[in-house]
Amino acid sequence: MEKYKIGEENVNCRIDKLIPILNKNITRAMAQKLLEDENILVNGSKIKSSYKVKLDDEICMQIPEPKETEIIAENIPLEVLYEDDDIIAINKPKGMVVHPANGNYTGTLVNALLYRCKDSLSGIGGQIRPGIVHRLDKDTSGVIIVAKNDKAHLNLSEQIKNHKVKKTYIALVRGNIPNDEATIDMPIGRSKKDRKKMDIDKNGKNAITHFKVLERFDGYTLLKVNIETGRTHQIRVHLMTIGYPIVGDIVYSNGKNPFKVTGQMLHAKSIEFKHPITGENMKIEAPLPKYFEDVIKELKK
């Protein structure tokens, strides 16, 4: 049990923002979960994440022992782009889910990582998301970084939160985009019509996507895309909203295309960041999948 008494320097600070300051091993998301589970109490009572602390408030924090991972380690081949004692970078194939969820507890990237890395993954993500710092949609291929210890996880999470990580994607969209480059700045929230989808919502979270045309074809455009924010389905929703859905996207377009591609043609080409331990500037790239290159060749004909 950890106890803290609030001094004048922290008065009016949100409790979920204050906890990571008091305990460097706890992220804001972890703090919110601890508050929800009543493992953090203020003056002996449960409070909301938005509670603003007052002078002399007493915070009692009980951090539960980590549960033994119940997710099965599976011998699934992985294309490793980079690995050291602190991080591992994988070229995730299309069709692979990043972490287990309801009805999908095998065949994920996490199952494969548990087999390859054994116990050397950050425990911050819990038993379902060990080491997972960011994610890619099931049918988005490309580079994804995984933390192998808590220190690396916390540092990478902070870099992502502060927009210090540059992610570059390649996307093939339907239609000919007239602008050579543009920025889409539209907030995104959960769709009110279909809770499995995301949508543009003025009350949603801010979302900013930059794109640049790489090549134009007959009825299609190849784009380089960078995102400032990492909202769920952000690139797919933004491009669909401006009238240029990603080829093969069965959720945000009709999914039809003459190339018989299933799932969106969206590839996480590279990621740039500072190494969480050494501070070295890193850029890790993932080559385009063969099917993606074949479609581009076909379009060039």
Image: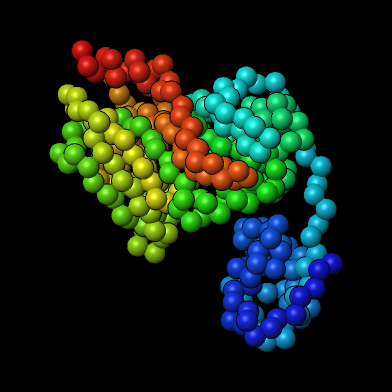
In the rendered image, the vertical position of residue 4 relative to residue 256, given as above or below: below
The N terminus lies in quadrant: bottom right
Task: Kindly identify the residue that appears in the image at 29 percent across and 41 percent down.
Answer: 211
Counting from the top left corner in percent of width and height, residue 104 is at: 63, 34
Question: Residue 106's image quarter?
Answer: top right
- Total of numbered circles in the picture? 0
Q: Nearer the viewer, residue 111 or 101?
A: 111
Question: Can you name the residue that lies furthest to the left here?
Answer: 178
Question: Residue 200's image quarter?
Answer: bottom left
Task: Kindly identify the residue that appears in the image at 22 percent across and 16 percent down.
Answer: 300
Task: Kindly identify the residue that appears in the image at 38 percent across and 46 percent down.
Answer: 227
| Residue 245 shown left or right of residue 39 in the figure | left
Counting from the top left corner in percent of width and height, residue 257 is at: 30, 24
In this rendering, does residue 136 appear at all?
Answer: no
Counting from the top left corner in percent of width and height, residue 182 is at: 23, 46
In the rendered image, the vertical position of residue 222 relative to residue 295, given as above or below: below
